[in-house]
Image: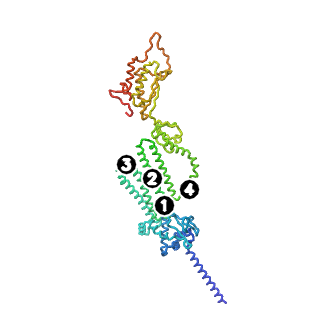
Amino acid sequence: MIAKLLRRLLFILLIAASFQKVSSAQNEVQRSKVNLSTPQKAVHSFLHWQQKGHQDLDKVAATMKLHDGPKDEQIELATELRKVLDARGLLIVYENIPNQPNYTDSLSGLQQYILFNELPEVYLIKHQNEWVFSTATIEQIPILYQNTFSTLVESVLAELPEWTQNEWIGLQIWQYMAIFCWLLLGFILRKIFEFIIHNYIRRLTKKTSFEWDDELVDSVERPAGFIFMMIFYFSTFTNLQLSVTANHFLDLSLEILVSAGFVWLFYNLSDVFSKYLQVVTSKTETKLDDQLVPLIRKTLRFFIIVLGIILILQNNGYNVASLIAGLGIGGLAVALAARDTLANFFGSITIFVDKPFRIGDWVKVGDAEGTVEEVGFRSTRIRTFYNSLISVPNSNIANTDIDNLGLREYRRFKTVLNLTYSTKPAQIEAFVEGIKGIVKSNSHFRQDMYEVHFNSLGAHSLDVLVYVFFKVPDWSTELQQRHNFLIEIMKLAEEVGVEFAFPTQTLHVDSLYSESPRQVGKEKTEEELAAAVTAFGPKGEKSNPDGLRIFKDGTEIDYSPGK
């Protein structure tokens, strides 16, 4: 009986042991099996089993099963592909990868999934209900690895001692040395590039007769050196073999810096182009193109900066089209908020089309009076005669009366000369004709239009109207000729014996009835008066249209400006 119980117990133990072995075998099979049912799970298996702490390269090799070689080669291909993705800073976001077993690409209609648009040659396909890397991807991995890592760097790393592989604060020792050499080499290459431009290309430009090519070299030298350095960094940073996060940041930063370098280059070139236009426009007679040059320069600068920002955003994955569309939705609000700016902009267009003034003209716009210095998008800058600078909004100028004193062909001078009532008619006639002679003898007067007449019997004087026009280029010359003209009139008045009156009321007892009246002025014969008129006429002996001549010790004193 006891023997029978022992046999039964032994049978139960044997059955339990066999079940335990089957369960262990099933668990081992389950653990060795890789989940490749969807693109997301296949990519997860590819990356997860290559991480430190839970590395299992045999499972990683399953994603390369379309490779006909041994498992060691499959593992090597998977390792190289991961290094390529990490070195290029291509971050994998699992949430963006489809998790459907029967996923189909919307463009090709095939069951395939491209991991990155920047790397279309790397993609998964569905093979026997499993998602694995395609044969084309497997063939491209060695090529991608060679394009990503320098053979020279790889050979140097192979010869480094083991202590350089030790880690310190997340990086290996050799990586710290490599980063220092990488930065130093880029700086040295930039200096060499700028040295070549400065010492060799500049020599060629100095041999030419143009000046703009020298300015072109000056404007290109620094941004071109910066671009050269950034391109070197951008094309070699993968050899540092940093983490995928660091490489992603480096890739993004260096790409932005390269784009910023080109913006800097074209920004400087716009200045050179503006200077070239300024030289061209200075040779033309019209001044309209001269005042267009500053506006063209500002427009080019604004366009280059805006285009550069758009390209940088576009290259970094931002949908610029949707951004612009969003701005269009809020365009009405922006237009309402910036209506003054838009009014000033269209005012500047009106100024250039209508041409009410030019750079350098003397204008009077409302309360502002002075010389036009610059016409911009928003305002026009006027330098006043007390040397301050007034900025007048272009919208105000477009809607305001503009008195352009700089476009005057002639400058009017109008005055009334008051003679005393004791002046005789012959003296008045001689005085008037003498003034006409002064005008005729001076080439700075307009000869076809002037008026000098005995015009009015005033309350206290006999009034002579003088209405003439100066033909002079500027205000300073006008003042000088006005000074000369008035001096000539005073000399003429003294010569013909007339007196100037002033507004007073005087009670004067001239003489008694029995006495002779007092004599006013000098007694002149008609011949003497005629001689005086002739003397002040053209080429007369007393004609002096250039002003009063004063002599000291026989030498004429020069009172002209600057003497």
Relative side of 101 to 524, left or right: right
Which circle's residue, 3 or 4, is located before the other in the chain? Answer: 3
Label 4 or label 1, whichever lies nearer to me, is 4
Residue matched to label 3: 210
User: Measured from the top left, where is residue 521 in percent x and y?
Assistant: 42, 18
Identity of the amino acid at label 2?
A: Phe
Q: Is 349 placed above or below 534 here?
A: below
Q: Which of disc 1 and disc 2 is earlier in sequence? A: 1
Is 147 in front, or is 448? 448
Residue indicated by mark 4 = 322
Q: Secondary structure at mark 4?
A: helix
Residue kind at label 1, given as amino acid type: Asp
For the residues marked 2 and 4, what is the alpha-carbon distance in whole angstroms?
Answer: 27 Å
Please state which of residues 367 and 50 is positioned toward the viewer in this rendering: 367
The residue lying at 58 percent from left, 52 percent from top is 329
The residue that appears at 43% across and 15% down in the rendered structure is 519
How far is the residue under mark 3 from the one under mark 4?
46 Å
Q: Is residue 460 left or right of residue 541?
A: right
Q: Quadrant of residue 452?
A: top left
What mark, if any, has residue 454 been given in the picture?
Answer: none
Q: Amino acid at mark 4?
A: Ser
Residue under the image location 34 percent in, 27 percent down: 552
How far across and how far down the image is residue 22, in percent? 59, 80
The residue that disc 1 covers is 251
Which residue is the site of mark 2?
Answer: 266
Calculate the distance from the C-alpha at mark 1 to the C-alpha at mark 3: 41 Å
Kind of residue at disc 3: Phe
CB within 8 Å, label 2 to label 3: no
Q: Which percent across, then down, holds residue 466? A: 45, 26
Q: Residues within 10 Å of mark 4 (few under 14, many from 20)?
A: few
